[in-house]
Image (cartoon, helix red, strand yellow):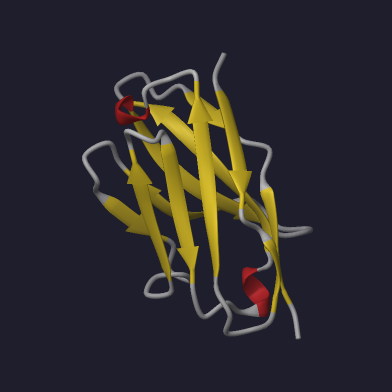
């Protein structure tokens, strides 16, 4: 059974940092691309960052230069470092994994990030 569990969310002030983790079980992470998405109340889910199985990285325009995605395949864990946080970064952050070639995707339940002064 495939499971994704995000952690590391919380309430921080503008300018502070968080590090999100996505622990994956039931599959070999090396065979998957990893994406982080977020959704704020009343808004559509948007791509934050994506890292392919070959470590090619894509960032959303609003987070480029502030967030860093990474992965540790032997640990079956992906990370998202969030620096210089802004109130508009608040939302529920989801981890997803996409099977290489087939595109089959799994999602985690999400972890809440709130940036407020």
**What quarter of the picture does the C terminus occupy?**
bottom right
**What quarter of the picture does the N terminus occupy?**
top right
Q: Position of residue 48 (x, y in %)?
A: 49, 57
In the image, taking residue 82 as reference, residue 108 lies left or right, namely right
Residue projecting furthest to the front: 75
- Residue at horizontal 29 percent and vertical 21 percent from the top: 101
- Residue at horizontal 60 percent and vertical 44 percent from the top: 6
| Residue 31 occupies quadrant | top left
Decide which of 115, 40 is in the foreground and name it. 115
- Residue at horizontal 34 percent and vertical 42 percent from the top: 72
**Is the residue 98 above or below the residue 41 in the image?**
above
Residue projecting furthest to the top: 1
Decide which of 114, 37 is in the foreground and name it. 114
Q: Position of residue 108 (x, y in %)?
A: 61, 36
Q: Position of residue 55 (x, y in %)?
A: 24, 46
**Is the residue 73 above or below the residue 60 in the image?**
above
Residue projecting furthest to the left: 54
Q: Position of residue 62 (x, y in %)?
A: 48, 71
Decide which of 35, 41 is in the foreground and name it. 35
């Amino acid at each position: 059974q495939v499971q994704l569990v995000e952690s590391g969310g919380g309430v921080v002030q503008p300018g502070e940092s968080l590090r999100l983790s996505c622990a994956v079980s039931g599959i070999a992470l090396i065979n998957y691309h990893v994406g982080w998405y977020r959704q704020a109340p009343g808004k559509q889910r948007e791509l934050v960052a994506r890292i392919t199985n070959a470590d090619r990285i894509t960032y959303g325009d609003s987070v480029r230069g502030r967030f860093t995605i990474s992965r540790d395949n032997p640990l079956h864990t992906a990370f998202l470092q969030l620096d210089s946080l802004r109130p508009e970064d608040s939302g529920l952050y989801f981890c997803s994994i996409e099977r290489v070639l087939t595109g089959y995707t799994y999602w985690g339940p999400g972890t809440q990030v709130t940036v407020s002064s």
